[in-house]
Image: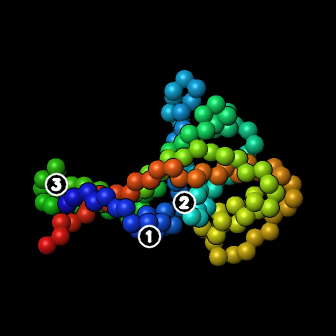
Amino acid sequence: MKTVVHKDKAFIEETIRRCDICYLGMADTDGTPYVLPMNFGYKDGTVYLHSAQEGRSISILDHNPKVCLAFSIDHDLVFQHPEVACSYRMRSKSVIAWGKVVYEEDFDRKVEALDLLMAHYSDKTFKYSDPAIRNVKIWKIDFEEVTCKEFGAPHQK
Protein backbone atom coordinates (compact mmCIF):
# COMPACT_ATOMS: atom_id res chain seq x y z
CA MET A 1 0.00 0.00 0.00
CA LYS A 2 1.21 3.47 -0.76
CA THR A 3 0.31 7.13 -0.59
CA VAL A 4 -0.50 8.76 -3.93
CA VAL A 5 -0.41 12.52 -4.44
CA HIS A 6 -3.14 13.73 -6.80
CA LYS A 7 -2.82 17.00 -8.71
CA ASP A 8 -5.69 16.43 -11.13
CA LYS A 9 -8.34 19.13 -10.55
CA ALA A 10 -11.20 16.74 -11.40
CA PHE A 11 -10.00 14.20 -8.80
CA ILE A 12 -9.63 16.93 -6.16
CA GLU A 13 -13.08 18.37 -6.87
CA GLU A 14 -14.74 14.93 -6.87
CA THR A 15 -13.18 14.24 -3.46
CA ILE A 16 -14.56 17.52 -2.11
CA ARG A 17 -18.02 16.96 -3.64
CA ARG A 18 -18.30 13.48 -2.12
CA CYS A 19 -17.41 14.75 1.36
CA ASP A 20 -20.32 15.57 3.68
CA ILE A 21 -18.43 17.50 6.38
CA CYS A 22 -15.28 19.60 6.22
CA TYR A 23 -13.08 20.39 9.17
CA LEU A 24 -12.01 24.00 9.50
CA GLY A 25 -8.90 24.79 11.52
CA MET A 26 -7.92 28.21 12.78
CA ALA A 27 -5.51 29.63 15.37
CA ASP A 28 -6.70 31.67 18.36
CA THR A 29 -4.83 34.84 19.36
CA ASP A 30 -2.58 32.85 21.74
CA GLY A 31 -1.90 30.24 19.05
CA THR A 32 -4.35 27.69 20.43
CA PRO A 33 -5.76 25.56 17.60
CA TYR A 34 -9.53 25.53 17.13
CA VAL A 35 -11.16 23.07 14.73
CA LEU A 36 -14.82 22.93 13.72
CA PRO A 37 -16.71 20.33 11.71
CA MET A 38 -18.89 22.27 9.28
CA ASN A 39 -21.42 21.85 6.49
CA PHE A 40 -20.26 23.51 3.31
CA GLY A 41 -20.94 24.44 -0.27
CA TYR A 42 -18.26 24.34 -2.96
CA LYS A 43 -17.78 25.87 -6.39
CA ASP A 44 -14.69 26.55 -8.50
CA GLY A 45 -12.06 26.55 -5.77
CA THR A 46 -14.21 28.39 -3.24
CA VAL A 47 -15.86 26.99 -0.12
CA TYR A 48 -18.87 28.62 1.49
CA LEU A 49 -19.75 28.13 5.15
CA HIS A 50 -22.39 29.66 7.38
CA SER A 51 -22.71 30.48 11.05
CA ALA A 52 -24.26 32.77 13.60
CA GLN A 53 -23.09 36.39 13.64
CA GLU A 54 -21.11 35.91 16.88
CA GLY A 55 -19.12 33.24 18.63
CA ARG A 56 -15.63 31.98 19.32
CA SER A 57 -14.85 31.29 15.66
CA ILE A 58 -15.90 34.81 14.62
CA SER A 59 -13.73 36.32 17.37
CA ILE A 60 -10.76 34.23 16.24
CA LEU A 61 -11.25 35.09 12.56
CA ASP A 62 -11.52 38.81 13.36
CA HIS A 63 -7.87 38.59 14.51
CA ASN A 64 -6.61 35.99 12.02
CA PRO A 65 -8.68 35.08 8.94
CA LYS A 66 -6.22 32.37 7.80
CA VAL A 67 -7.74 28.88 7.88
CA CYS A 68 -7.06 25.32 6.86
CA LEU A 69 -9.83 23.05 5.55
CA ALA A 70 -9.74 19.25 5.58
CA PHE A 71 -11.98 16.97 3.51
CA SER A 72 -11.77 13.16 3.80
CA ILE A 73 -13.70 10.30 2.15
CA ASP A 74 -13.68 6.55 1.47
CA HIS A 75 -12.45 5.39 4.88
CA ASP A 76 -11.72 1.68 4.94
CA LEU A 77 -9.42 -0.32 7.20
CA VAL A 78 -7.11 -2.45 5.02
CA PHE A 79 -4.11 -4.69 5.69
CA GLN A 80 -1.44 -6.65 3.91
CA HIS A 81 -1.35 -9.48 6.46
CA PRO A 82 -4.16 -10.09 9.01
CA GLU A 83 -1.75 -11.00 11.85
CA VAL A 84 0.77 -8.16 11.39
CA ALA A 85 -0.39 -4.99 13.12
CA CYS A 86 2.08 -2.79 11.20
CA SER A 87 0.49 -3.86 7.91
CA TYR A 88 -2.88 -2.26 8.79
CA ARG A 89 -3.73 1.12 7.38
CA MET A 90 -6.78 3.29 6.90
CA ARG A 91 -7.44 3.68 3.19
CA SER A 92 -8.87 7.11 2.38
CA LYS A 93 -8.71 10.14 0.12
CA SER A 94 -8.23 13.64 1.46
CA VAL A 95 -7.95 17.24 0.36
CA ILE A 96 -6.30 19.89 2.49
CA ALA A 97 -6.78 23.52 1.47
CA TRP A 98 -5.61 26.84 2.86
CA GLY A 99 -7.15 30.26 2.45
CA LYS A 100 -8.56 33.29 4.22
CA VAL A 101 -12.13 33.82 5.38
CA VAL A 102 -13.92 36.79 3.85
CA TYR A 103 -17.48 37.48 4.97
CA GLU A 104 -20.07 37.86 2.24
CA GLU A 105 -22.30 40.84 3.03
CA ASP A 106 -24.22 41.29 -0.24
CA PHE A 107 -27.79 39.96 0.17
CA ASP A 108 -28.02 38.27 -3.24
CA ARG A 109 -24.58 36.68 -2.93
CA LYS A 110 -25.52 35.36 0.50
CA VAL A 111 -28.54 33.68 -1.11
CA GLU A 112 -26.29 32.19 -3.83
CA ALA A 113 -23.91 30.87 -1.18
CA LEU A 114 -26.77 29.30 0.79
CA ASP A 115 -28.09 27.74 -2.43
CA LEU A 116 -24.64 26.21 -3.07
CA LEU A 117 -24.49 24.96 0.49
CA MET A 118 -27.94 23.39 0.33
CA ALA A 119 -27.26 21.92 -3.15
CA HIS A 120 -24.35 20.01 -1.64
CA TYR A 121 -26.83 18.08 0.53
CA SER A 122 -30.13 18.11 -1.35
CA ASP A 123 -31.67 18.32 -4.81
CA LYS A 124 -34.49 20.49 -3.46
CA THR A 125 -34.92 24.19 -4.11
CA PHE A 126 -35.15 26.33 -0.99
CA LYS A 127 -36.47 29.77 -0.10
CA TYR A 128 -35.10 31.92 2.70
CA SER A 129 -36.75 34.70 4.65
CA ASP A 130 -35.22 38.16 4.52
CA PRO A 131 -34.41 38.10 8.28
CA ALA A 132 -32.70 34.71 7.88
CA ILE A 133 -30.47 36.10 5.11
CA ARG A 134 -29.67 39.28 7.03
CA ASN A 135 -28.84 37.34 10.23
CA VAL A 136 -26.67 34.56 8.80
CA LYS A 137 -22.90 34.96 8.59
CA ILE A 138 -21.61 33.66 5.25
CA TRP A 139 -17.95 32.72 5.08
CA LYS A 140 -16.21 32.65 1.69
CA ILE A 141 -12.83 30.91 1.42
CA ASP A 142 -10.95 31.00 -1.87
CA PHE A 143 -8.34 28.25 -2.02
CA GLU A 144 -4.81 29.67 -2.01
CA GLU A 145 -3.14 26.27 -1.81
CA VAL A 146 -4.50 22.72 -2.14
CA THR A 147 -3.05 19.25 -1.61
CA CYS A 148 -4.76 15.93 -2.30
CA LYS A 149 -3.62 12.47 -1.24
CA GLU A 150 -4.90 8.93 -1.46
CA PHE A 151 -3.72 6.80 1.47
CA GLY A 152 -3.42 3.02 1.43
CA ALA A 153 -3.65 2.81 -2.35
CA PRO A 154 -2.71 -0.59 -3.72
CA HIS A 155 0.57 -0.82 -5.63
CA GLN A 156 0.03 -1.05 -9.38
CA LYS A 157 0.86 -4.46 -10.81
* Residue 87 location (% of width, % of height): 16, 54
Distance CA(mark 2)–CA(mark 1): 11 Å
* Residue 133 located left or right of residue 36: right
Along the polypeptide, which appears first: circle 3 or circle 1?
1
Q: Which mark is residue 10?
A: 1
Q: Residues within 10 Å of mark 1 (few under 14, many from 20)?
A: few
The amino acid type of the residue labelled 2 equals Gly
Q: Image quadrant for the N terminus?
A: bottom left
Lower sequence index among marks 2 and 3? 2
Classify 10 Å Cα crowding around label 3: few (below 14), some (14-19), many (20 and above): few
Q: Residue tagged by mark 3? A: 87
Specify the farthest residue to the right: 130
Of 24 and 121, the residue lying toward us? 24
Q: Is residue 123 above or below residue 129?
A: below
The amino acid at mark 1 is: Ala
Residue 61: quadrant of the picture: top right
Residue found at the very far top of the displayed protein: 30
Q: Are marks 2 and 3 in contact (CB under 8 Å)?
A: no
Q: Which residue is mark 2?
A: 45
Q: Position of residue 55 (x, y in %)?
A: 69, 37
Provide the secondary structure element on which disc 3 rests. helix
Is residue 70 visible to the viewer in this orientation of the structure? no
